[in-house]
Image (tube, rainbow, N blue to C red):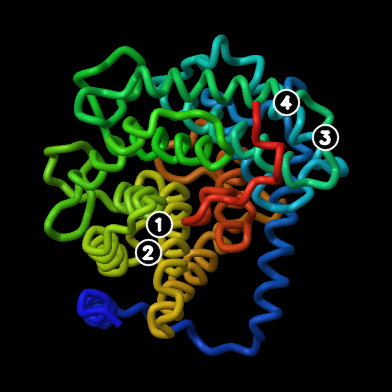
């Protein structure tokens, strides 16, 4: 074992030991009972989405492109065979809605933000194309067209990177930039690259660097570069995104990890975008666990964090199987909360490529355009 490796292992144990997550109260339920209950709640949420899809294939109200993307990602993240049965049909309707709401790879702007719809729609189509490579039941949709749209959409995202390396809410804003927009764009580029869809890797590298520069001394991440004000949900997004770097940045990730533990799950749940914060918090912890999973203490703490997030989100579920909107997106109705919650509940086990530090090994011959 090299001196550097020993140092890093010692550093990790020290940092991990500096914060603790409260132990889950003892109860009568076994882990298997908990897993079954979670699966049942997630199933009810997916059933609610299936029953409440609009005729045009969309979900949501103002931000139908983004909310429909969340729902499609939730279906894709739920099963290795997402194109079967009634849910498979609704998934394809959602994908077709996204496909008709773009022109030459640029999705329609809705509300105050364009990049979130652009990023999440491109991500949903990228992951849909990727799942089609592995699924035994092939989707009744033109997957080559999906791949082509993703390629065009990625180029649109590339063309709108700001001079700082980040992205802004609207296209054509080279002098503006912000953290959540950059998280959305970078994760989309990673997904496309995972499925051998051409991206400009220098653009991806600059996006990663932008986010790294947004980190403050306390481990939190700025709303935008130079803001010097650590955000709660934004930090979760930064950790989840930087965890996808091929070369793991130990210092950045561990500082972000400790910041998330310090602010507590309850604090994220009280923020403007609690589903967003919890989703990326789970994803970040999962990626950290993949890197340091051999360390028992570390594995247990990250697993505990994910379990506590799930417990918090499950407590919000309503009797009809749906989740309410919370925070600053009240106008979107239950579709937003339900799509994001069911997506969040799939994070550790789900087959989406962005849930893993290593890209999937593509079937021979299927990754060529």
Name, please, the residue furthest toward the right: 85
Front-most of residues 311 and 186: 186
Provide the residue designation for mark 4.
57
Query: Are the residues flagged by discs 2 and 3 in contact, CB closer than 8 Å?
Result: no
Q: Pick whichever of labels 3 and 4 is earlier in the sequence.
A: 4
Q: Which mark is residue 89?
A: 3
Q: Which mark is residue 199?
A: none
Residue name at image x 57 percent, y 14 percent: 102
Q: Is residue 209 left or right of residue 186?
A: left
Q: Quadrant of the N terminus?
A: bottom left
Q: Pick whichever of labels 4 and 2 is earlier in the sequence.
A: 4
Which numbered disc, 1 or 4, marks the residue closer to the eye? 4
Q: Is residue 220 left or right of residue 200?
A: left
Q: Label 2 vs label 1: CA separation?
A: 5 Å
Q: Residues within 10 Å of mark 4 (few under 14, many from 20)?
A: some
Q: Judge whether 196 appears above or below 23 on screen.
A: above
Q: Judge whether 291 appears above or below 82 on screen.
A: below
Q: Is residue 359 left or right of residue 99?
A: left
Provide the residue designation for mark 1.
269
Which numbered disc, 2 or 3, marks the residue closer to the eye? 3
Q: Residues within 10 Å of mark 3 (few under 14, many from 20)?
A: some
Query: Are the residues flagged by discs 2 and 1 in contact, CB closer than 8 Å?
Result: yes
Q: Is residue 75 visible?
A: no
Q: Residues within 10 Å of mark 2 (few under 14, many from 20)?
A: few
Task: Residue 262: give x, y in percent of width and height.
Answer: 26, 68
Q: Quadrant of the C terminus?
A: top right
Q: Pick whichever of labels 1 and 4 is earlier in the sequence.
A: 4
């Amino acid at each position: 074992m090299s001196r550097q490796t020993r140092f890093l292992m010692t550093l990790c144990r020290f940092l991990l030991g500096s914060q603790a997550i409260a132990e889950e109260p003892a109860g009568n339920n076994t882990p298997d009972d908990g897993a079954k209950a979670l699966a049942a709640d997630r199933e009810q949420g997916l059933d609610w989405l299936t029953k409440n899809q609009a005729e045009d294939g969309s979900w949501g109200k103002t931000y139908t492109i983004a909310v429909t993307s969340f729902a499609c990602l939730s279906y894709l993240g739920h099963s290795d065979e997402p194109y079967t049965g009634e849910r498979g049909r609704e998934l394809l309707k959602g994908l077709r809605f996204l496909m008709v709401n773009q022109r030459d790879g640029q999705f329609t702007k809705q509300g105050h933000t364009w990049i979130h719809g652009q990023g999440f729609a491109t991500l949903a189509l990228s992951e849909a194309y990727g799942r089609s490579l592995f699924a035994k039941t092939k989707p009744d949709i033109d997957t080559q067209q999906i791949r082509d749209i993703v390629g065009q959409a990625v180029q649109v995202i590339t063309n709108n990177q700001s001079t700082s390396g980040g992205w802004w809410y609207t296209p054509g804003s080279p002098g503006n930039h912000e953290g959540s927009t950059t998280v959305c764009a970078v994760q989309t580029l990673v997904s496309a690259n995972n499925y051998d869809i051409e991206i400009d890797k220098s653009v991806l590298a600059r996006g990663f660097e932008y986010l790294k520069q947004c980190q403050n001394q306390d481990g939190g991440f700025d709303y935008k570069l130079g803001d010097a004000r650590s955000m709660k949900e934004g930090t979760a997004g930064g950790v989840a995104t930087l965890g996808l770097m091929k070369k793991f940045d130990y210092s950045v990730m561990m500082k972000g990890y400790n910041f998330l533990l310090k602010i507590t799950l309850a604090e994220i749940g009280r923020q403007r975008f609690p589903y967003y914060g919890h989703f990326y918090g789970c994803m970040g912890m999962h990626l950290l666990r993949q890197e340091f999973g051999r360390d028992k203490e570390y594995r247990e703490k990250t697993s505990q964090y994910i379990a506590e997030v799930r417990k918090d989100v499950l407590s919000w579920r309503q009797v009809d199987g749906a989740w309410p909107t919370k925070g600053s997106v009240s106008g979107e109705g239950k579709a937003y909360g339900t799509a994001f919650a069911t997506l969040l509940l799939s994070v550790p086990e789900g087959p989406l490529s962005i849930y893993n530090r290593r890209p999937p090994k593509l079937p021979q011959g299927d990754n060529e355009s």
